Amino acid sequence: MVLQPVGERIRLGAVAARPRAGPLEEVRDRDDVSRPPRTGVFLNANPDTTPLALRANLEHNHTVHETVVIISLEALNVPHVRRDERIKHDDLGYKDDGICHMTARFGFQDDIDVPAVLRAGLHELEGEVDLEHVSYFISRASISPSDDPSMAQWRKKLFMAIQRNATNPVGYFKLPDERTVVMGAHVEL
């Protein structure tokens, strides 16, 4: 499905994409951005795009943390992933911009603990990381039906019900409530 901006909303069309996500160069190349001396951890399903929460933080607050860690979680069809095979780092082509990407691999019986992933991969990160003052950001889209005929109404309602009944990501990923921010966009089906 193609996402097309509709004012402040995003409409789903016929080809799959992510809402308002784009390459990290759009974030990296801006000079009107404040870089506060803390670490921001952004969960992102697609390692090829900028997390929606990072872009929203940039657009609304003109802020990108001094150290940014983008974490993608990869579920494997095995019961457990060995700890020495769990984390893969990527500096995204720039070793000095404070932005890096981690992919954490989990088996279907492994607990997903994002703070533990961050601790385990600390030695590979760019910049100073104070684990007691890390802010976690989650991207979330709110979904509503539209009159667009490309998807049957019953499918739209089913998709919205599944999304509404989804598990709270803060608890699921073992994120600290007091340091987790949920940012998102509105999507019309």
Image: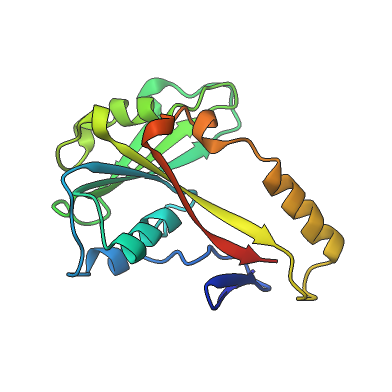
Relative depth, front residue between 96 and 170: 170
Residue beneath the point at 52% across and 22% down:
111
Residue beneath the point at 25% across and 29% down:
131
Q: Quarter of the image holding residue 179?
A: top left
Q: Quadrant of the N terminus?
A: bottom right
Q: Is residue 109 left or right of residue 88?
A: right
Residue beneath the point at 58% across and 36% down:
168
**Residue 168 versus residue 16 in the image, above or below:** above
Q: Is residue 91 left or right of residue 138?
A: left
Q: According to the image, what is the colour scheme of the structure?
A: rainbow
Residue beneath the point at 31% across and 69% down:
26
Q: Is residue 14 left or right of residue 44?
A: right
Q: Quarter of the image holding residue 144?
A: bottom right
Task: Give the percent coordinates (x, y) of residue 116.
Answer: 37, 25
* Count of numbered marks: 0
Task: Give the percent coordinates (x, y) of residue 8.
Answer: 52, 73
**Residue 5 versus residue 177 in the image, above or below:** below
Q: Quadrant of the C terminus?
A: bottom right
Q: Quarter of the image holding residue 151?
A: bottom right
Relative depth, front residue between 92 and 159: 159
**Residue 14 versus residue 125 in the image, above or below:** below
Task: Give the percent coordinates (x, y) of residue 30.
Answer: 22, 69
